[in-house]
């Protein structure tokens, strides 16, 4: 234990204090749009446990601690959400309906359908369409790879990886992961510039949806809806590839 912290030039308590803001930030990002019964405090608690476990197990062979700890913290929070079973079957059914309508309209129109066209095809109001997109957003924020690549015979889920190593443990899984990343990058390149910007700010700059909304001068809920539509678009493109 002492050797682990000695390599960082800090005590255990100092390391915990250093990473606590990061735990709260990850919790804030994952809590966006989650149902009311999901307590943000539970996410923070699971994240703190992930932090403690990461600090306990970390050594320099695992690479940079700045990269290692956030992975372990987010992984702990996602595990907590999965245990809650917070996505009801009715929601999953509605998500599939949106995806099916998107694919049908894309084939018929020869282009990406608008939200108005999706709402009309599903025979729901714009408000209901917005709610469906927001619900999709809650799923993709936690199950991103599973959502984008589900149904893919080469699908590799987040759970297939072990965060205790600086490299993916399974060489075959690592190769498939790189292939997925390449396909995803190609799909993202086909998106409008504004949508690419939103993805960059969320996944690269790690801004919250609220922060992105402030930059783009749109509401947080609108950013959530746009993010959801981007996910449906990417899933469609990846299934076609």
Image: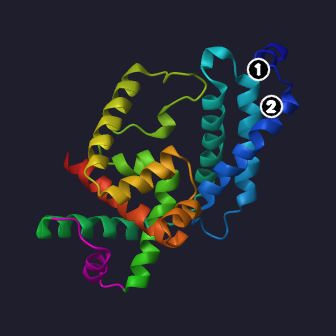
Lower sequence index among marks 1 and 2: 1
What residue did someone put label 1 on? 8
Q: Is residue 141 left or right of residue 119?
A: right
Asked if disc 1 and disc 2 are in contact, CB closer than 8 Å, the reply is yes
Q: Nearer the viewer, residue 197 or 186?
A: 197
Q: Nearer the viewer, residue 191 or 152?
A: 191
Residue 166: percent from the left, percent from the top? 56, 22
Q: Find the magenta span and give its range.
A: 111-124
Mark 1 surroundings within 10 Å by alpha-carbon count, few (fewer than 14), some (14 through 19), many (20 or more): few
Q: Secondary structure at mark 1?
A: loop
Q: Which mark is residue 93?
A: none
Q: How is the image coloured?
A: rainbow
Taking the magenta stretch, the answer to whether it contains residue 115 is: yes
Instruction: Evaluate whether residue 143 shows in this view.
Output: no
Taking the magenta stretch, the answer to whether it contains residue 48 is: no
What residue did someone put label 2 on? 15
Quadrant in the picture for residue 15 = top right
């Amino acid at each position: 234990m002492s050797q682990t912290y000695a390599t960082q030039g800090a005590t255990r308590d100092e390391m915990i204090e250093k990473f606590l803001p990061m735990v709260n930030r990850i919790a804030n990002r994952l809590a966006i749009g989650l149902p009311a019964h999901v307590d943000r405090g539970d996410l923070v608690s699971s994240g703190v446990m992930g932090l403690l476990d990461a600090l306990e197990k970390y050594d320099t062979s695992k690479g940079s601690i700045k990269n290692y700890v956030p992975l372990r913290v987010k992984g702990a929070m996602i595990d907590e959400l999965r245990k809650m079973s917070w996505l009801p079957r009715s929601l999953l059914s509605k998500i599939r309906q949106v995806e099916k309508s998107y694919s049908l309209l894309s084939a018929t129109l020869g282009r990406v359908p608008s939200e108005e066209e999706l709402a009309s095809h599903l025979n729901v109001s714009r408000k209901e369409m917005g709610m469906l997109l927001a619900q999709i957003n809650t799923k993709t924020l936690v199950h991103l790879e599973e959502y984008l690549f589900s149904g893919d015979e080469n699908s590799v889920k987040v759970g297939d990886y072990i965060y205790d190593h600086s490299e993916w443990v399974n060489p075959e899984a690592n190769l498939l992961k790189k292939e997925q990343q390449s396909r995803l990058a190609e799909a993202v390149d086909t998106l409008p510039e504004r949508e690419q910007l939103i993805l960059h700010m969320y996944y690269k700059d790690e801004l919250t949806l609220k922060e992105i909304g402030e930059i783009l001068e749109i509401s947080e809920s609108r950013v959530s809806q746009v993010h959801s539509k981007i996910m449906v678009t990417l899933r469609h493109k990846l299934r076609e590839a």
